[in-house]
Image: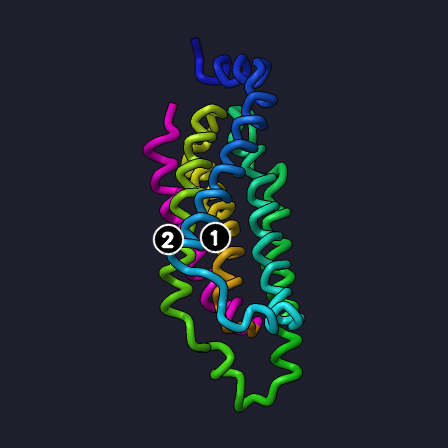
Amino acid sequence: MKTDDLIELLAKDSVPPRFRSVLAWAVASGIIIAAILFSVAIGFRPDISEAVKSGRFLFKFVVTVSLAVTAIWVTLSVGRPDGRLAHRGLALAIAPALLACAAVLELLVLPESQWMNHLVGHNSRFCLTLIPLLSIGPLACLIAALRAGAPSSPGVAGAVAGLAASGIAATFYAANCTDDSALFVMTWYPMAILIVTTAGYLVGRQVLKW
């Protein structure tokens, strides 16, 4: 059987509804694993009761949740044998666009002398460590789910799974991070997310081949 014929056969099979169900369980399991690790090893920032009153603090979750939701939605597409990133890939621009707008607004409001302090912040090292750490469970669950979907582009599917896992992880980490500046988030969160996305790509290329 030719590869194209196999892809067409799998696309017509009951993989899509089954994959949706498997992916839903994977997302739920990944969130639970990340939540347990966060509760046991990291925890909320000390001033969480005051932080929730801040728009800048809450906006971090708008960005991270947007990334997680859109990446999971795209995973539904790239995880199928007939799926392509182009079908839903533009949705991945939502979170960066929101963050870029917030960063530009912050640059307009803050004096130039404060730009670097807000960008560097106090938690860059933790950001680059904790987001990948919290992503391990969600990424493992999503990669396992993708094996049930037979993606036609294993590396791309793994990378999108990495985006989704890092979005979940960043949402938890944002509750611990005391740097609420959009400049900080725009600088350090993407670096941590890139680490996870790259790991997802490399793992996907090896594990999701069929």
- For the residue labelled by badge 2, is the local secondary structure a helix, a strand or a loop? helix
Judge left or right: residue 102 versus residue 38: right
Count of marks placed on residues: 2
Mark 1 in CB contact with mark 2 (< 8 angstroms): yes
Judge left or right: residue 26 versus residue 198: right
Residue 139: percent from the left, percent from the top? 42, 42
- For the residue labelled by badge 1, is the local secondary structure a helix, a strand or a loop? helix
Residue 79: percent from the left, percent from the top? 51, 31
Foreground residue, 208 or 66? Answer: 66
Give amino acid for label 1. Answer: Ala
Q: Earlier in the sequence, mark 1 or mark 2?
A: 2
Q: What is the chief secondary structure element of the magenta stretch?
A: helix
Judge left or right: residue 172 versus residue 98: left
Q: Which mark is residue 169?
A: 1
Please give the range of residues in magenta. 182-210
Would you call the spot at circle 1 few (<14 residues within 10 Å), some (14-19), or many (20 or more)? many
Would you call the spot at circle 2 few (<14 residues within 10 Å), some (14-19), or many (20 or more)? some
Magenta segment includes 206: yes
Give amino acid for label 2. Answer: Leu
Q: Residue at x 38, y 57 (%)?
A: 41
Hey, which residue is sitting farthest top in the picture? 1
Q: Residue at x 52, y 38 (%)?
A: 27
Q: Which mark is residue 133?
A: 2
Q: CA distance from mark 1 to mark 2?
A: 8 Å
Seen in the picture, residue 122 relative to 139 is either above or below; the reply is: below
